[in-house]
Amino acid sequence: MTMKFKVLLVLLIITAGAALLITEARKVGFREGYAPIQPIKFSHKIHAGDNKMQCLYCHFAADKGRHAGIPPTSLCMNCHTKVLPNSPEIAKVKEAVSSAKNIKWVRVHNLPDFAYFNHSQHVNVGKVSCQTCHGQVQTMAVLKQEKPMNMGWCIQCHRDNKLAPPEDHKRAAGGDCARCHY
């Protein structure tokens, strides 16, 4: 091998490595496909799908503020005093209620601290369905993050659905970084 060929080969390897590193680094923090094991086997397919429970029944703060909220453990017992009361999973819920401890669910959808998102603005003003961001939850026996939920994805959604004043469509959600980052 000539010296020129060796230099070109090394440069090619470095370039390919850098491209791979940049591609993988851009994925850091994005948890598409993330489906953690929860402390209680809870199926959105059964609750939201088969039984047609509305998202807002459990996530009752989604139309009122920034966070959708994780339902308090006692809410489960509204139904489960009568429905499957002897299930091993419901026994865990009963134990949590009787000990006055909430279940420590593992968060599935999580935005970085530097990004501001308000559920109520999207639910009430934008009329955005839960499935737009969270995927077809009503079909999931195990909840998983189906969408990338990164900045580019959000901006594209705002552009596609014209969720900004007409004069701002070219700049997504107004072109003002402080709308989401402060």
Image (cartoon, rainbow, N blue to C red):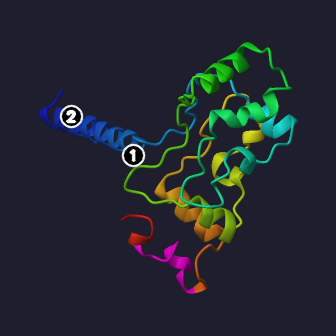
Amino acid bearing label 2: Val
Mark 1 or mark 2, whichever is nearer to me:
1
The number of discs equals 2
| x then y, percent, for residue 152 | 49, 58
Residue range highlighted in magenta: 167-176
Residue 178: x percent and y percent? 39, 71
Q: Is residue 133 left or right of residue 51?
A: left
Circle 2 is placed at which residue position?
Answer: 10
User: In this picture, is 130 found above or below 109?
Assistant: below
Determine the image quadrant of residue 4: top left
Quadrant including the N terminus: top left
Query: Who comes first in sequence, dot 1 or dot 2?
Result: 2
Residue at 50% of width from left, 38% of height from top? 31
Q: Is residue 21 above or below residue 155?
A: above
* Alpha carbon distance from label 1 to label 2: 24 Å
In the shown orientation, is residue 72 left or right of residue 6? Answer: right
Residue 119 vs residue 79, the one in the foreground = 79
Judge from the rendering whether residue 124 lies leftward or rightward of residue 181; answer left or right: right
Q: Position of residue 116 (x, y in %)?
A: 45, 60
Mark 2 surroundings within 10 Å by alpha-carbon count, few (fewer than 14), some (14 through 19), many (20 or more): few
Furthest toward the left, the residue is 3
Is residue 147 at least partly visible in the picture?
yes
Residue linked to disc 1: 26
